[in-house]
Amino acid sequence: MAPVRLAAVLLALVVPPAPAADEAQLKRGEVLFQAADCLACHTDVKGDGAPLAGGRPLATPFGVFFSPNISPDPQTGIGAWSEAEFRRALRQGVGRLGEYLFPVFPYPAFTGMTDADIADLYAYLRTRAPAAQPDRPHQLRFPFGWRFLQLLWRALFFRQGPLPPVAGESPEWNRGRYLAEAVVHCQQCHTPRNLLGGLETGRAFSGNPQGPDGMKVPNITGDGETGIGKWSLEDIATLLKTGQTPDMDFVGSGMGDVVKGTAALTDADRRAIAVYIKSLPAIRTAKTPAF
Ligand code: HEC
Ligand code: HEC
């Protein structure tokens, strides 16, 4: 074999066959990855786990879920997943073997993402360090571990995306809605849930005293007493950038992680989210929950 051809063959062995993602795409993917908070759920911080290797416990009324490994390790992570399989997980909440995923994974929000954004996210995830760590089985109360029951849940509560823009609303409002609903998934924490774990859409954004992982999540609708009606647009945008509230406090709990993500967005994007949040109908909750 001529040396040139030999070199070409060797090169073909080391260079991955898929077209390499460009820098701009990876940057976009990184911002989405941060804003959607994938890292916080998929890393067992308390257990000193490797980034994205999973194993973080998530307590719910149905039992304890352990997040799976989504690092690019081909055996224990999602390194062997195609882009189409990854898209199906986010868009449809369906795993690689066709199984229904549990909505503790916020696919009911991520379903709203565009194909282009999901492709950027996929490209970025593939650049992360692979970590070999097998998934830990969930510890769910009977009969919630039966994945086929998800068929019922999905029929009741799941509406497949992508999220279409609302005609008659400004591009800024639509951008804010897209980020809040599909990417940062505010409702997954800020909207109360019914007994089956579905979002109570009639009380959207009005807070959840028993939020995910026992978090106390405040009302962020425009009610002046029990919500954030007194906050200006800038107040909301500032919180999403620095974590600081108008009374000079800093948010903690799950919102601390959220802010690390929204801090990576542009000022225009944070403002767009604030415009959308400001447009929500005010809902008065029974009393101001004691936080
Ligand atoms: C609120 C916590 C949470 C967030 C945020 C989250 N995930 Fe997950 N994710 C989970 C849990 C829990 C599962 C397991 C669901 C199941 O077993 O049905 C999961 C499952 C998955 C799966 C399927 C993996 C498998 O092995 O079947 C993929 C892919 C995934 N998540 C990717 C992501 C990406 C990408 C993001 C950010 C855009 C993200 N997740 C954000 C908790 C989360
Ligand atoms: C992972 C769950 C989670 C997500 C997702 C989330 N939040 Fe929060 N949020 C919280 C919690 C918990 C608090 C209370 C923080 C504290 O007690 O320090 C909070 C507090 C806030 C506050 C302060 C309210 C007050 O009265 O002090 C605002 C405003 C807010 N969130 C807006 C948002 C917006 C907008 C989004 C989406 C872009 C969002 N949150 C997504 C959990 C979440």
Image (tube, helix red, strand yellow):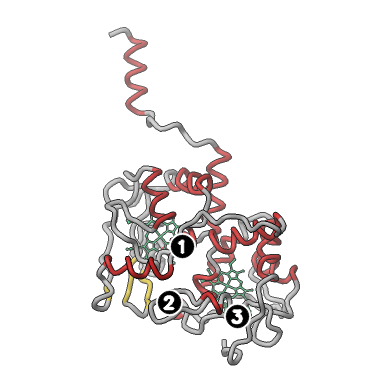
Label 3 beta carbon within 8 A of ligand 2: yes
Q: CA distance from mark 2 to mark 1?
A: 24 Å
Mark 3 secondary-structure assignment: loop
Residue located 37% across and 76% down the image: 59
Q: Position of residue 211 (x, y in %)?
A: 47, 78
- Given residues 168 and 37, the one toward you in this image is 168
Q: Quadrant of the N terminus?
A: top left
Q: Against 199, is 154 above or below? A: above
Of callouts 1 and 3, which one flags the residue occurring earlier in the amino acid sequence? 1
Q: Against 51, is 145 above or below? A: below
User: What residue is shown with label 1?
Assistant: 159
Of callouts 2 and 1, which one flags the residue occurring earlier in the amino acid sequence? 1
- Tell me which corner region of the image, top left, top right, bottom left or bottom right, holds residue 61: bottom left
Mark 2 or 1: in front is 1
Mark 1 burial class by Cα count in 10 Å: few <14, some 14-19, many 20+ = some
Mark 1 secondary-structure assignment: loop
Asked if residue 49 lies left or right of residue 120, the reply is left
User: What residue is shown with label 2?
Assistant: 213
Asked if residue 109 lies left or right of residue 43, the reply is right
Q: Residue furthest bottom?
A: 287
Of callouts 3 and 2, which one flags the residue occurring earlier in the amino acid sequence? 2
Mark 3 burial class by Cα count in 10 Å: few <14, some 14-19, many 20+ = many
Asked if residue 5 lies left or right of residue 226, the reply is left
Q: CA distance from mark 1 to mark 3?
A: 24 Å
**Three-letter code for the amino acid on which mark 3 is drawn:** Asn
Q: Position of residue 221 (x, y in %)?
A: 64, 77
Mark 2 secondary-structure assignment: helix
Q: Quadrant of the C terminus?
A: bottom right
User: What residue is shown with label 3?
Assistant: 219
